């Protein structure tokens, strides 16, 4: 759906049921050992609880850091189906229903039993009836609500719904599974299928991605219609929460709905789901509830690359528990590789960029880093980089705070254009001024351009920027009704970019770090360049000479106010491996403690071998390795 920028709220209350001592056991072996009837009673009975785990057991959830902000009594030792369903009530009442009342569309991604708990609340289903409700894997169920937050019963014969439910299935349960299985067969037997249908891992423009997707979906529908019989589908393997019972679809819509599916027609939920959305969306959108991760502090970090046989947190590699800010520029995009001005254009990561992000996560994990909160821009390349880093560090459950204020610099009319062609057309001097000038702004983009943020759906949700009178008048005249429009940038200099990133860092991110939290910031080159200019006191006349490598974690130590790099074990000096530009000396100058005394925080590397450097380059990197000789780097 290309909506990575949307806020995501994560909650333990949507976790799957806690199976107590059954956790991790083989269902078949356990049934043979204890008796199928007893095990089935634990699994399928509404109120029966399996034997609880002990606090000393490996599977006790309190062992995991993600649950460290829960009270001891909140962590379940075992749960019945009813216990699992009941714990969803607070998040329904306090969060989901609140969002719906604001006129917002909400997507909930969870597990069979917690989703059944929400359905039980929404449709007011009784304890006995809920056991007949099944929610198959990967099949969206759509609800509409009236003004009083009561579910609206679907009318007509177009929709597939289930007994006791007012929600609508977007496809017949079982078709998706059959289609995926059929796709495996096509990959093996249909010449050219894999090349046609597999989405490229490299970056594509929005137009290329849309055309490719449309073509692939068209071919999949055609092949599915020829190869899949909706009457011959294995519907239920027990993973939907109702222990393998058949799904009871409403009789009055089943036959016609099935015929619609045979004809290739499906429900298309266009428009808004909430009847008051048009009125509600005009009201001011407030920020989401703050999330306060638990912080553990005061342990020093390690820079030397640890032995591969050492596990972080044990032996010579302690987990880093003191406050820290790690900055990482997103991995490479195809725009980066082609030398295009990207700015606010939402270019996805290239294959190399994904690998860079994964390696960054592996490196941080190897050095014992953990985070308490993650910040990204609203651009998918920064968000995806954060995802991949978190995945490698086994912390995808962490809160991610997304803000447009960490977006890349807005390049205006240069967006999407070749840097080489711009330089050739306007000359080197003008090119450098537009590209790296601290106060020089590129030519602005038109209000009617697809590159203007005001024409991008994601920026219609902004509420922390003033109203533009001229844009509001123009757009209201065009639409025939009052249409408020925010003053979004049409082009930015580096200073203008910093005017939004620095206040956000100082007001939102720095207090988190100052309170002891470990922070990861995933953003773009100029947003990070502006942050480093402030954090490392880089002069205005030198900031244009600073380069930010893609996918490289840069550790900002709050105590010493300096940047550190992590040894990756390759034996290469990172100052030779990465290009930081001529302003690198400001990043890696001597680090000092709170008393002004120099600290031992040089960049570490494992080899003195020079990899093809010129004499001048070697002299420069050698000077960076010896920052304490007469303070020569300041």
Image (cartoon, rainbow, N blue to C red):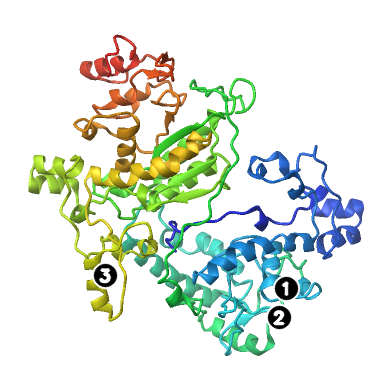
Image quadrant occupied by the N terminus: bottom left
Q: Quadrant of residue 356?
A: top left
In the rendered image, the vertical position of residue 446 relative to residue 430, given as above or below: below
The image quarter in which residue 634 lies: top left
The answer to which quarter of the image holds residue 391 is top right
Residue drawn at x 49%, y 20% is 304
Q: Which mark is residue 111?
A: none
Residue located at (48% from left, 36% from top): 513
Question: Which label number is shown at residue 472?
Answer: 3
Find numbered disc 3 in the image and state the secondary structure of the residue it sits on.
helix
Q: Tell us which disc is closer to us: 3 or 2.
A: 3
| Nearest to N terminus: mark 3 or mark 2 | 2
The dot on residue 133 is: 1
Q: Position of residue 33 (x, y in %)?
A: 90, 51
Badge 1 local density, few (<14 within 10 Å), some, or many (20+)?
Answer: many
Which comes before the other along the chain, label 1 or label 2?
A: 1
Q: Which residue is mark 2?
A: 163
Mark whose residue sits in front, 3 or 1: 3
């Amino acid at each position: 759906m290309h909506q990575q920028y949307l806020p995501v709220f994560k909650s333990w209350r949507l976790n799957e049921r806690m199976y107590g001592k059954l956790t991790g056991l083989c269902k078949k072996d356990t049934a043979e050992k204890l008796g199928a009837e007893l095990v089935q009673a634990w699994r399928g009975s509404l109120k029966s609880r399996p034997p609880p785990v002990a606090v000393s057991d490996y599977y006790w959830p309190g062992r995991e850091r993600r649950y460290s902000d829960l009270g001891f009594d909140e962590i379940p030792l075992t749960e019945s189906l009813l216990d699992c369903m009941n714990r969803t009530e607070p998040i329904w009442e306090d969060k989901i229903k609140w969002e719906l009342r604001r006129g917002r569309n909400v997507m909930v991604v969870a597990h069979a039993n917690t989703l059944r708990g929400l359905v039980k609340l929404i449709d007011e289903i009784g304890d006995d009836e809920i056991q007949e409700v099944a929610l198959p894997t990967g099949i969206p169920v759509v609800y509409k609500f009236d003004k009083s937050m009561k579910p609206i019963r679907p009318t007509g014969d177009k929709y597939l719904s289930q007994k006791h439910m007012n929600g609508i299935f977007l496809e017949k349960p079982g078709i998706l599974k059959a289609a995926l299985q059929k796709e495996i067969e096509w990959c093996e037997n249909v010449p050219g299928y894999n090349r046609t249908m597999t989405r490229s891992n490299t970056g594509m423009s929005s137009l290329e991605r849309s055309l490719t997707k449309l073509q692939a979906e068209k071919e999949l529908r055609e092949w599915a219609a020829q190869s899949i019989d909706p009457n011959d589908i294995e519907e239920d393997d027990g993973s939907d929460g109702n222990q393998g019972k058949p799904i009871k679809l409403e009789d009055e819509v089943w036959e016609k709905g099935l015929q619609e599916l045979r004809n290739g027609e499906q429900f298309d939920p266009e428009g808004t789901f909430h009847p008051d959305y048009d009125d509600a969306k005009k009201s001011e959108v407030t920020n989401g509830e703050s999330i306060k991760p638990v912080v553990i502090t005061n342990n020093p970090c390690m820079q030397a690359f640890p032995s591969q046989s050492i596990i972080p947190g044990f032996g010579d590699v302690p987990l880093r528990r003191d406050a820290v800010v790690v900055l990482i520029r997103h991995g490479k995009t195809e725009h980066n590789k082609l030398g295009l001005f990207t700015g606010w254009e939402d270019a996805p990561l290239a294959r190399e960029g994904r690998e860079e992000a994964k390696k960054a996560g592996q490196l941080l994990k190897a050095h014992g880093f953990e985070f308490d909160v993650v910040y990204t821009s609203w651009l998918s390349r920064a968000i995806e980089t954060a995802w991949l880093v978190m995945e490698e560090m086994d912390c995808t459950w962490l809160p991610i705070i997304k803000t447009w204020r960490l977006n890349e610099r807005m390049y205006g009319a240069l967006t999407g254009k070749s840097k080489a062609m711009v330089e050739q057309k306007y000359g080197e001097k003008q090119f450098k001024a537009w590209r790296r000038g601290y106060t020089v702004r590129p030519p602005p983009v038109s209000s009617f351009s697809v590159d203007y943020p005001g024409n991008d759906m994601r920026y219609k949700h902004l509420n922390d920027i003033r109203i533009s009178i001229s844009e509001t008048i123009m757009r209201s005249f065009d639409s025939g009704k009052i249409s408020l429009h925010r003053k979004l940038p049409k082009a930015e200099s580096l200073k203008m970019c910093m005017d939004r990133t620095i206040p956000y860092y100082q007001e939102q991110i720095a207090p988190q770090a100052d309170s002891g939290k470990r922070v990861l910031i995933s953003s773009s080159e100029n947003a990070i360049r502006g942050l480093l200019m402030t954090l490392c006191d880089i002069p205005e006349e030198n900031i244009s000479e600073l380069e930010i490598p893609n996918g490289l974690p840069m550790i900002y130590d709050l105590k010493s106010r300096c940047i550190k790099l992590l040894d990756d074990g390759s034996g290469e000096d990172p100052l030779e491996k990465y290009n930081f530009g001529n302003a690198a000396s400001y990043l890696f100058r001597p680090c000092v403690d709170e008393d002004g005394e120099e600290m031992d925080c040089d960049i570490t590397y494992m080899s003195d071998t020079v990899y093809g450097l010129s004499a001048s380059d070697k002299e420069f990197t050698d000077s960076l390795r010896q920052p304490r000789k007469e303070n020569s780097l300041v």
